[in-house]
Amino acid sequence: MVVLLLLVGVFVVRISAEGQLVLPPQPAGAGSAARDAGGDTGRDGEADAVPRPAGAAARAAPPLPGSTATRLRIPSVRVDAPLTRVSLDADGWIDAPPAGRPELAGHFQGSVTPGEQGTSVIVGHVDTAQGPAVFYDLGRLAKDSRVEVTRADGTTAVFTVYGVESFTKHGFPAESVYRATGAPELRLITCGGPYTEKTGYQGNVVAFARLTETRRAA
């Protein structure tokens, strides 16, 4: 699956007591500018821009049949969120959950359900006008962190994070992010990178994870 789309956010970020903008945590090594995989890099450049499974994520668990995702848990960054379904908006961008429901994460219906063979995509706001949202701490995720997705069939798909990156909007390596890898994988996506009051966030934070365990309800 190749989907050329981004999650775009123009929301209010927090201001410190000193009057400074307080941005959400960014992936280690992101610095002040998000990674740009665009330009003349082509497919090889895109592939080089995304992490590869290693460590605990090197070996994938067997894929699961399709089943609606109902809840997302990421213990290391205290995410415990109900899941809704999202699709594309009229302009072809991924339609994030309603801004009035900052606690929601959204499974993109154009992708496989979490745990199926292929790459599943879950999106969420980083913040809203009211403050931090469900994926505020996504950039803080470390390699080997666990991501748990509860499914309607009673199973929990457990993924292991093998990389977290920040990409500019214009350099987003869509094909490499969304493509099927031959294993059940998951992408968690929110807004990130530099921020301006005029245009909002200039990029996206993407967490890459692979299915490594399946738990079944007792």
Image (cartoon, rainbow, N blue to C red):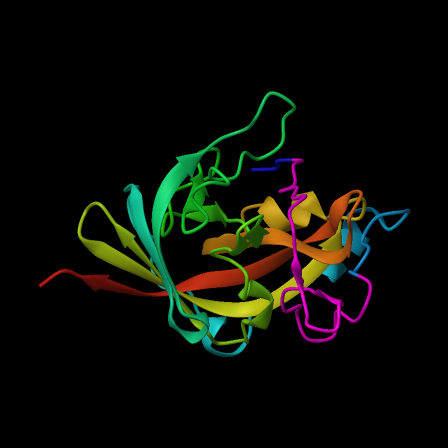
**Where does the C terminus fall, quadrant-wise?**
bottom left
Q: Is residue 51 visible?
A: no
- Residue 27 lies in magenta, yes or no? yes
- Would you place residue 18 above or below residue 21 in this image? below
Dividing the picture into quadrants, the one containing residue 53 is bottom right
Q: Residue at x 32, y 46 (%)?
A: 69
Quarter of the image for residue 101 reads top left
Residue 127 belongs to magenta span: no
In the image, 58 versus 26, the foreground residue is 26
Residue at image x 55%, y 28%?
Answer: 88
Q: For the N terminus, which image quadrant?
A: top right
Q: Bounds of the magenta span? A: 4-33
Q: Residue furthest left?
A: 218
Q: Quadrant of residue 217?
A: bottom left
- The dominant secondary structure in magenta is loop
Left or right: 41, with 57 as reference point: right
Q: Position of residue 31 (x, y in %)?
A: 79, 71
Measured as percent of width and height from the top left, residue 90 is found at: 60, 20
Q: Nearer the viewer, residue 214 or 192?
A: 192
Residue at the image point whose x is 52% and y is 39% from the top: 96
Residue farthest along the right direction in this orientation = 40
Q: Position of residue 204 (x, y in %)?
A: 67, 52
Q: Give left or right: position of 199 versus 78.
A: right
- The total number of labels drawn is 0
Q: Residue furthest top?
A: 90
Q: Is residue 167 above or below residue 32?
A: above
Give left or right: position of 170 versus 201: right
Q: Residue at x 50, y 68 (%)?
A: 161
Q: Residue 28 location, x and y as percent?
A: 68, 75
